[in-house]
Image (cartoon, rainbow, N blue to C red):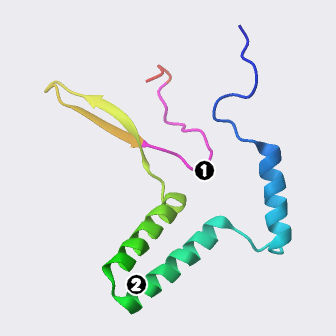
């Protein structure tokens, strides 16, 4: 039976395009949410360094942790087992939208 509607996880492209056009017009083509988040994280770090408060340092670390997800790739889980009976799981994700050429054709 054929599935109806959009595939699970697909984006709302028309809304994304309209939102992108609105932000580019409002900020005269100078708006990038990732760059904005990085600049905000740097400001939080400056505040933490001037106050010396541990809560400000925690906020700085949290801000950089959120931003790092857009800059550094994370690992995808890969399950491995050996003769010893120990199972190790490793995750690796690609954020550039390209297909992983190293995938095994057996589906594993």
Residue placed under numbered mark 2 in the picture: 48
Quarter holding the C terminus is top left
| Mark positioned earlier in the residue sequence (1 or 2) | 2
Q: Is residue 18 left or right of residue 12?
A: right
Residue placed under numbered mark 1 in the picture: 96
Report the magenta stretch's main SS.
loop
The location of residue 102, given as percent across then percent down, is: 49, 36
Give me the residue at 37% from left, 35% from top.
78
Residue nearer the viewer, 50 or 80:
50
The location of residue 71, given as percent across then percent down, is: 53, 62
Residue nearer the viewer, 67 or 50:
50
The location of residue 43, given as percent across then percent down, is: 52, 82
The crowd level at tag 2 (other Cα within 10 Å; few <14, some 14-19, many 20+) is some
In the rendered image, which quarter is residue 76 located in?
A: top left
Rounded to the nearest angstrom, the CA distance separating label 1 from label 2 is: 33 Å
The location of residue 17, given as percent across then percent down, is: 82, 52
In the rendered image, which quarter is residue 6 located in?
A: top right
The crowd level at tag 1 (other Cα within 10 Å; few <14, some 14-19, many 20+) is few
**Residue 56 - label:** none
Tag 1 secondary structure: loop
Residue nearer the viewer, 19 or 82:
19
Q: Is residue 31 left or right of residue 60?
A: right
| Range of magenta residues | 92-104
Give me the residue at 48% from left, 80% from top.
44
Q: Is residue 87 left or right of residue 19?
A: left
Tag 2 secondary structure: helix
């Amino acid at each position: 039976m054929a599935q109806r509607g959009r595939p699970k996880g697909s984006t709302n492209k028309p809304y994304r395009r309209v939102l992108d056009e609105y932000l580019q017009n409002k900020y005269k083509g100078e708006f990038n949410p990732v760059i904005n988040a990085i600049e905000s994280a740097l400001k939080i770090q400056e505040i933490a360094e001037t106050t010396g408060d541990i809560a400000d340092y925690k906020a700085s670390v949290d801000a950089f942790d959120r931003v790092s997800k857009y800059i550094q790739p994370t690992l995808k889980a890969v399950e491995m087992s050996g003769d010893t009976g120990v199972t190790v799981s490793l995750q690796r994700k690609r954020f550039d939208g390209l297909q992983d050429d190293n995938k095994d054709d057996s589906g594993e």
